[in-house]
Image (spheres, rainbow, N blue to C red):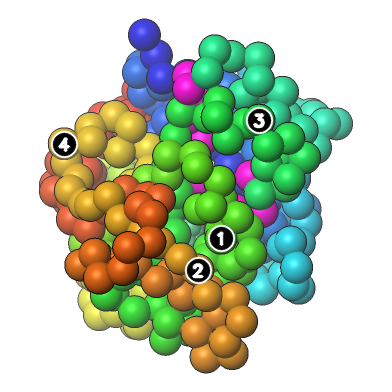
Amino acid sequence: MKKKVIIDTDPGPDDGVAILTALGSPLIEVLGVCAVAGNVPLHHTIRNVCKILELAERQDVRAFAGADAPLARPLFTAEYVHGKTGFEGYDLPEPTMPVQSQHAADYIIEEVMSHPPRTVTICALGPLTNIAIALERDERIAERIEQIAWMGGALSEGGNVTPAAEFNCYVDPEAAALVLRSGIPVVMMPLDVTHKAHVTVERIRRFRTMGNKVGPVFAELLTYAKQFDWQKYGADRAPMHDPTTIVWLLRPELFSGREVNVEVESVSPLTTGMTIIDWWGVTDRQKNAYVVHDVDAEGFYDVIFESFRRLP
Ligand code: BDR
Ligand code: CA
């Protein structure tokens, strides 16, 4: 049976690769795609969601717009990495498919509650604002969601937006804390994992020479975004973040990690958005997440390419 998945996202090219990896897999049914403000403001992220669905010729998958700002602070965006629209580097056509009128948080509640308990997974590829709002509006979903696979946080890799914080957690730490306290099984893909799945020139070449429509588009989008990362982390050492959540659903044996306690800092000016991960079990705080630490990068990219090759 196919895994039923809601994707909550703020595209960005990494998000795009994740969505397409899910759409190309025969083992995943994408129930809906929700946009949240993050990499760029909401009016761009929802448009980018529709651009990806149209590129994949999957206008049948419904797109929902959610929060345009974090729960309790102003929005911080990353145009300095992804350009003004979030999708600089390739001019995808303006989408024509409709955006649903329902708020993404209400859609999440309705979709989760209309399925049997623990049969709907959420892949969260951005700040957790939409999911936190859904939890605030109807806490019953905590007992109904199968798991949330979230790209966010960092253990010993350091931060990518401040010395301490990873972007998705930094943008909305209050939402991350709320989700981690909710009792929903959370699988967390921190920078420690995504910084092991390098976007190399050779891997971009594999996207470009795939022989379909989507591969070369993502070769261009990744090349634009990764120039910034290659300067920051070193040539050929750009991370691939968001698809880790989707590949986790398809091939969990490619990853390893630990069940631990994770708390989120939201007060200190120096460490806001930092995930405090009790890797060594030095507290008796309750374990609330499976934090992944390692990935078989070759196997990970094989899954992505396999999915992409099934797309137009
Ligand atoms: C996360 O931030 C975004 O820029 C990426 O899409 C990813 O979700 C990495 O810190
Ligand atoms: Ca993202």
Identify the residue at horizontal 59%, vertical 14% (top origin): 115
Q: Is residue 171 magenta?
A: no
Up/down of 86 relative to 246, above or below = below
Residue 176: quarter of image: bottom right
Q: Is residue 155 above or below residue 5?
A: below
The reply, left or right, for residue 87 in relation to residue 277 is right
Q: What residue did someone put label 4 on?
A: 253
- Where's residue 202, x and y in %? 19, 56
Q: Nearer the viewer, mark 3 or mark 2?
A: 3
Residue identified by numbered label 1: 177
Q: Residue furthest right?
A: 101
Query: What residue is shown at x 85% (from left), y 31% (from top)?
Result: 101
Q: Which residue is the site of mark 2?
A: 264
> What's the distance in space between the residues labelled 2 and 1, CA to CA?
6 Å
**Label 4 near label 2: C-beta < 8 Å?**
no
Q: Earlier in the sequence, mark 1 or mark 3?
A: 3
Secondary-structure class at tag 4: helix
In the image, what residue type sits under mark 1? Ala
The CA span between labels 1 and 3 is 18 Å
| Quadrant of the frame with the C terminus | top left
Magenta stretch?
118-131
Looking at the rendered structure, the secondary structure element under dot 1 is helix
> What amino acid does circle 3 point to?
Arg
